Amino acid sequence: MAVTRTFSIIKPDATRRNLTGAVTAKLEEAGLRVVASKRIHMSREQAEGFYAVHKERPFFGELVSFMISGPVVVQVLESEDAVKRNRDVMGATNPKDAAEGTIRKTFAESIEANSVHGSDSEENAAIEIAFFFKPEEIVG
Ligand code: CMP
């Protein structure tokens, strides 16, 4: 199977609780390799642009407010079948539905403060990676 890339965000609820390393350890234990990483504080414009696909959803305003409430860590992850591997280790969007041992089951506080974002397809991974990283910032 081909080595592919996906995009991850460690969200403000996790950075606030000093869980950047603990979340990254779960990603690495799952076989994902961090090939780019930076800690940023998103602007409102960045968060609205990143989540534009959700702009008609009732939770959009709160989602944007939450994502700019503190620093996040944006990462590019690499492995065989990286999108699926990352989604498997993240667990379901709502931590109440997430499987034991997943990042969201272990760390998430709520469906909004759910500790991590991960791309849902290779196509979206490419778009999301390009939203935050220049090609030369990714070192595999
Ligand atoms: P994420 O993978 O970052 O993509 C969109 C986010 O919206 C999602 O994770 C959730 O954290 C957040 N969200 C907040 N409320 C809801 C909801 N009711 N249904 C789905 N996602 C929600």
Image: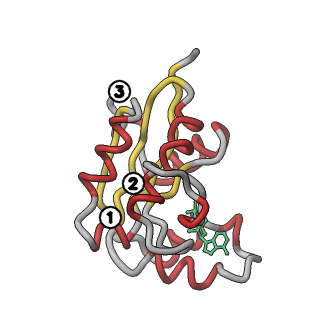
Asked if residue 8 is positioned above or below residue 121 in the image, the reply reads below
Quadrant of the picture in which ligand 1 is shown = bottom right
Asked if residue 39 is positioned above or below residue 2 in the image, the reply reads below
- Secondary structure found at label 2: strand
The quarter of the picture where residue 33 lies is top left
Q: Which residue is mark 1?
A: 40
Mark 3 and mark 1 in contact? Answer it, CB < 8 Å: no
Mark 1 and mark 2 in contact? Answer it, CB < 8 Å: yes
Q: What amino acid is labelled 1 in the image?
A: Ile
First along the sequence among labels 2 and 3: 2
First along the sequence among labels 1 and 2: 1
Task: Residue lying at the far top in this picture: please name it.
Answer: 1
Q: Which residue is mark 3?
A: 140
First along the sequence among labels 3 and 1: 1
Q: Distance between the Cα atoms at labels 2 and 3?
A: 16 Å
Q: Which residue is mark 2?
A: 74
Image quarter where the N terminus lies is top right
Q: Distance between the Cα atoms at labels 1 and 2?
A: 7 Å
Q: Which mark is residue 61?
A: none
Residue positioned 52% across, 33% down in the render: 82
Position of residue 83 in the picture relative to residue 79 (left or right): right
Mark 2 and mark 3 in contact? Answer it, CB < 8 Å: no
